[in-house]
Amino acid sequence: MTETLFLTSDEVAGLADPAEYVDAVRDAYRQIGEGGSAEPRTKLVNEEPPGFLTTYAAVLPETGAMGGYTYSAGFGELDAWFMTPLFDAKSGEPLALLDGASMNPYKTGAAGAVGVDALAREDASSVALIGSGAQARGQLRATATVRDLETVWVYSPTKESREAFAGDMNKELDASVAAVASAAAAVEDADIVITATNASDPVFDGDDLEPGAHVTAMGQYDPRKRELDHRTIERSTYVPDLRARATRDAGSFLSALEAGVVDESHIHAELGEVVAGVEPGREDDDEITVFDSGGTGIETVAAAYLLYEKALDRDLGQYIDFAPASEALTGE
């Protein structure tokens, strides 16, 4: 039998701060850029009851870990569960099984921040944030660790939600955070634009982007989800988390591709290639850049391993037994 550490969502909540997540995720993307392995999500859809089962995985050779997410959403309970298996990349043995719910906004926010750090101007200090949910909080907290933010304008359709978000984050961050009445008002003059929505239609006009702006879009993990319009894609140096994902489930890029606005050569590089220095990132201050962050096993494994190590240091969790196939299949 192999002892595997099981960690609940409560046990891993608060174990790492946003900067630690960003550091771990940045290094993970570097490893992928230098030859590590990751694949886009596989999504199985069920019609009745409506729901889907999603998986994705990555191998981080230097970290010595591999794994990913398996999660369900919808179905009869109309909820979601995030299971995160973590394996040793050398022996293959299961190291841990994490309830990944509480780490989700942090690891996703960290991926967005790595995109900002790799592609936004060094002097970027103002943010337009479209969205005011848990993922928007994760994106903003992480972005604040890679740029010295002065001003944040947040917009979401519900006035009470965006004002509550602004009030909370204004207390938490050094930057001034204010709610605005439209996406256009948020995007105007913004150095960094972050979309954290589940929108099926574009959430701002690409012509409103200032020269030199960077866009991180994290709600485009389905062909039907489209936060960015054709103009934004067309104007941008376009960098997805994984090249293969751009033509599989990156809704905004797929829409622009199908409309003939761009072709596949418009994919500049994967984020890992930019982080590793294999491909250039931003090359001038007027360039508009886009990081399309649809979710991968890269940030998931990096975050899970970070939390696993911290849990070991604090003696958290409980051990469960897994039978190796050599025992289970032979009965010996």
Image (cartoon, helix red, strand yellow):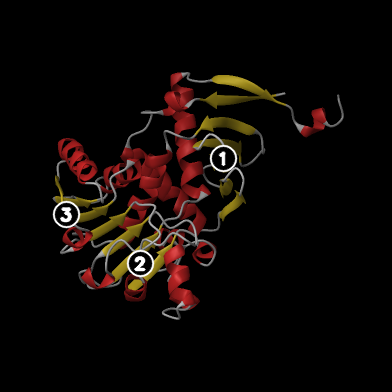
Q: Earlier in the sequence, mark 2 or mark 1?
A: 1
The CA distance from mark 2 to mark 3 is: 33 Å
First of labels 3, 1 by sequence position: 1
The secondary element bearing badge 1 is classed as: loop
The residue wearing badge 3 is 181
- Label 3, secondary structure: give it: loop
Q: Mark 3 is on which residue type?
A: Ala
- The answer to whether residue 97 of the structure is visible from this angle is yes
Between 327 and 165, the residue placed more toward the observer is: 165
Q: Position of residue 3 (x, y in %)?
A: 64, 23
Rendered image quadrant of residue 68: top right
Say the numbered circle drawn on residue 75.
1
Crowding around mark 3 (Cα neighbors within 10 Å: few <14, some 14 to 19, many 20+) is some
Estimate the x, y position of residue 247 in percent, counting from the top left: 52, 67
Picture layout, residue 226 above or below residue 53: below
Sooner in the amino-acid sequence: mark 2 or mark 3? 3
Label 2: which secondary element: loop
Name the image quarter holding residue 133: top left
Disc 3 to disc 1, how far (Cα)? 35 Å
Residue on which the image places disc 2: 281
Q: Identity of the amino acid at label 2?
A: Gly
Q: Which corner quadrant holds the N terminus?
A: top right
Residue 58 in percent (x, y) is at: 56, 49
Q: Is residue 20 left or right of 179 when viewed as pictured?
A: right
User: Image point 29% across, 55% down: which residue?
Assistant: 194
Q: Which residue is drawn at the image coordinates 20% and 69% (left, top)?
A: 210
**Quadrant (top left/top right/bottom left/bottom right) for the C terminus:** top right
